[in-house]
Structure formats: structure tokens, C-alpha cells
Image (cartoon, rainbow, N blue to C red):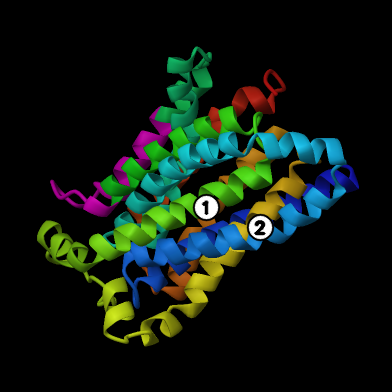
Amino acid sequence: MNKQAFRADLLLLLTAAIWGFGFVAQSSGMDYVGPFTYNGIRFILGSLSLLPLILIQGRKKRPAETADASKSARQKILYTFAAGSVLFVAVAFQQIGIMFTTVGNAGFITGFYVVLTPIFGIFLGKKTHLPTWVGMIFALTGLYFISLAGRGISVNPGDLITVISAIFWAAHILVIDYLVRRIDPLVLSSGQFAWCGFFAIIAALVIDPVVGSWAARIAPAAELQNWVTLPDIIGAGQGGALLGALIPLLYGGLASVGIAYTLQVVAQKDAPPAHATIILCLEGAFAAFGGILLRNERPTPFTFLGFAFMLGGMIVTQWDVIRGKQT
């Protein structure tokens, strides 16, 4: 392996680690603020963190390119709105799912999008090969061990909610795949994060005040966080909750979104697609490690077996890419 490829793989590994520990930040943030409040603030921070890169990139463009870009402002708004809408639904289900499941479970189940994306591609006329179907079987087996094995007939609602999130993450990837050829990637990312943050802030004002009681009804035994809602922060002067959530918010907004995204873009210039996809799949492993290290989570042997099946399914899904049959 040449030095550039090795450097790219290290950057991708760092990206996966940042994203994996981001699940810990998501869980920790809800010790202080509601799920939509957390998402709203972190995605707005993430959007703002990309603005300096966009400005630097804009200065390097020729005047003609800048003129053409100004003509497409309406398209940029529509494209980023579409991507941000799907992203908002994906992160909303993910954040709520974390309320009822472990950080490790959430990280691995979210990675199920690696299997779902090519399956959804069938409906867009894209071919789905045998490794995808084998990978799906592995992943579903892993979900069984993570959510059901050893529980009798009991189902973990957080795992099921996170599966819904993975469905929308797969849809988001397909939306991005379509839009990234029509708009600058940095502009698309910053714009979609801004829309997602805006929607989440609106939801924080309306939904966060009631989501706690709703959650208690569907999982009475769950250890729900006693967060402060955005209306209380604004109207009742309980801004101290934001100070308590400061580190999770900064990590979720600046590290998970701004830094990790930039590292991914830099790394994928030199990394083969197979390396990028498989290394980023390790996000779930880092999430599990972060949950054990920082949230005192204690996974069972069934959980580790489920992780192994899910990771195997993600890798099997990319088998054709590994063998060089796809790019």
C-alpha cells in the first residue's frame, strides 16, 4: 500500500472513530436537553463550521464560475431543502431510538443502511447482486441477536426505532448520490445541515415538551433523561442546561459534522471505495466501545454476536467492490 492510500485509510479510521463516539455525545446530550433541542443546535453548529471552507473554496474559483453559481441559488435552496428534510427524519428517529437502547446498539443498527441502500437502489433501476442479499441475511441475523436474543418475546423499542432511522439514512444516501453531481458538496452539506437544524429547532419547541411523557408510555422501565426543553430554556431562564450539554453539543456539531466530514472528503480523494466503505462501517464498533467506556454500558454475549453478524453483513455487501467488479 502506498503512503497516500495508507494516510487516507488512517483518516477514514479517524472519521469512523469520531462518528462512533458521536453516538456517546448524542446520548450524553440528552442528560441535559431534549432530543430535538440537541439535534437543532448541533446541526446549526455543523452548518456554520463548514462556512469557512466554503468561503475559501469560493475565493479560489474563477469569476465565471462564481457568476454561474449565483444563477443557481434557487436550485441550491431546493436541493439542500430536499436533503435536509430526509436528514432531519433520519436523525430524529436515531436520537429518539437512543433513548431506549444502548449507544453500541444504535451505532451498529444505524450501519444497517450499508445493506439497505443497494436494496432501495433496485427501485431506481440499479442492479443488486448476490453479496447484497447475503449481507442482508447476516445483518438481519445480527439485529435478532442485538434486539431479541435472550429477551423472550420482549422487543427493544429503541432498536426498532433505530431501524427506521437506518431506512431513512439509506434514503438520504440515495438523495445525496443524486444531488452531489448537481451542487458543490460543501454547499450541499452546509445547506442540508442548516435545514435539518431549522426543522429540529421547530420540533424542539413543539415536540420536546411532550416527548418525555410519550416515551414513558411506550417504555415505562426505561431510564429516561430529565432534560430541559427549549421553551423552558427560552422562557424560564434555564440556560444552565445548555452549559451542561456544551461538550456533547460541541462534539456533535463541530467534530461529528464539521471535522469528520472534512476528513472524509480529504481521505476519499486517495482511498479506494472498498476501503472507504468498510472502514467507515467501523463506526458501530467505536460507538459500542464508547458506550462501554463512557456510558457504563454492559453488552451481553448475544450483543457481541449480533455486532459480529452485522459487521460481517456490511463487509459482505461490499464484496463485489472489494474484488474490483464495481467502482
* Picture coordinates of residue 160, whole percent (x, y): 27, 45
Question: What is the quadrant of residue 321 in the picture?
Answer: top right
Question: What is the quadrant of residue 327 in the picture?
Answer: top right
Do we see residue 322 in this rendering? Answer: yes
Q: Along the polypeptide, which appears first: circle 1 or circle 2?
A: 2
Question: What is the quadrant of residue 33 in the picture?
Answer: bottom left
Q: Camera-side residue: 31 or 142?
A: 31
Q: Are marks 1 and 2 in contact (CB under 8 Å)?
A: yes
Residue shown at 13% from the left, 46% from the top: 153
* Picture coordinates of residue 246, whole percent (x, y): 48, 79
Is 251 contained in the magenta span?
no
Residue shown at 54% from the left, 72% from the top: 250
Measured along the vertical axis of the image, is residue 243 above or below residue 4? below
Do we see residue 313 in this rendering? Answer: no
Q: Amino acid at mark 2?
A: Leu
Measured along the vertical axis of the image, is residue 122 above or below residue 286? above
Instruction: Determine which residue is flagged by label 2.
Output: 50
Q: Which mark is residue 193?
A: 1
